[in-house]
Image (spheres, rainbow, N blue to C red):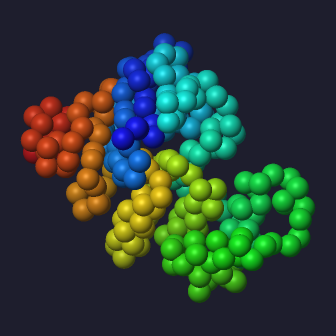
Amino acid sequence: MKPVLMCCNVSVDFDGFYALQGADLKVYPHEVRFLIGPNGAGKTTLLDVICGKTRASNGKVLFYSHDITDMPEHKIVRLGISRKFQSPSIFHQLTVWENMELALKQDRGLFAVLQAKMSEVDRDMIITLLQRIELLDYADQKAGSLSHGQKQWLEIGMQLIQFPQLLLLDEPIAGMSAAERERTGELIHEIARDCAVVIVEHDMDFVRRFSKQVTVMHEGKVLCEGTMEDIQQNEKVVEIYLGR
Ligand code: ADP
């Protein structure tokens, strides 16, 4: 199987400080990959490079073998890589439905935004996605009235409407209740039926519960990869991160 994503020897130089120093990552279709590591390890910078927010000073990023290393952010989104940041960027004054509608139209450009009517197919798609993120019953409510977890799910729904092939999530469960965390873990695995997911996560209980493959980063590089059981056996990981 061909990887969805390959980061090969990626470095990022912030005026002489290397946030990434030759990081490698391969992610396969339908995979849920957790990125963990101590603060400052370079996890967020790696997501930034993948989505085009930060330029790599060395190395390559390939998306289905297509070189996207120097591609601008908006073109990378169009290719099918979607990035969700830590705090939800939704429109609080609009309803849940209107947020989804806007995300759909934005994806299609200005002409769609100006068009008032939506097709039945589009409506069905929004309904299906709202069911998936458990917000169909909240469709007519203002997004600002949702719980923190529901706002995060809404934003995930707004990303999914663009049918990404790769979804990048930065600490998606931060600030969520226990029940919302559990649902988010399940949701991430449901999403992976359609697209690969890379998640930066600090909550180790969540990683233990929902991970299959974990990549540990340290000092701008990948330290090791494997199942949680594998990496817990790695002495260096225990020393620098898990602590024991
Ligand atoms: P992590 O997500 O693993 O906590 P980051 O990728 O956010 O790590 O940061 C890696 C290192 O790069 C940190 O030391 C951070 O201070 C530094 N860094 C991140 N962004 C910038 C920037 N724009 N300019 C300078 N240094 C940065």
Image vertical order of residue 196 relative to residue 210, above or below: above
Decide if residue 118 is on the left or right side of residue 37. Answer: right
Residue depicted at x 37% and y 33%: 25
The furthest residue to the bottom: 137
Taking the image as drawn, is residue 175 in sight? Answer: yes
Residue depicted at x 36% and y 76%: 179
The furthest residue to the top: 16
The C terminus lies in which quarter of the figure? top left
Seen from the viewer's position, the closer of residues 92 and 74 is 74
On the image, the x and y values in percent for residue 142 come to: 69, 78
Taking the image as drawn, is residue 188 in sight? Answer: no
On the image, the x and y values in percent for residue 61 come to: 49, 28
The furthest residue to the front: 1
Seen from the viewer's position, the closer of residues 13 and 210 is 210
On the image, the x and y values in percent for residue 145 come to: 63, 78
Residue depicted at x 45% and y 40%: 4
Seen from the viewer's position, the closer of residues 171 and 1 is 1
The N terminus lies in which quarter of the figure? top left
Decide if residue 240 is on the left or right side of residue 148. Answer: left
Decide if residue 224 is on the left or right side of residue 119. Answer: left
Image vertical order of residue 190 relative to residue 48, above or below: below
Residue depicted at x 42% and y 60%: 193
Image vertical order of residue 188 relative to residue 53, above or below: below
Decide if residue 103 is on the left or right side of residue 221. Answer: right
On the image, the x and y values in percent for residue 116 come to: 88, 70
- Give the number of marks: 0
Determine which quarter of the picture holds residue 42.
top left
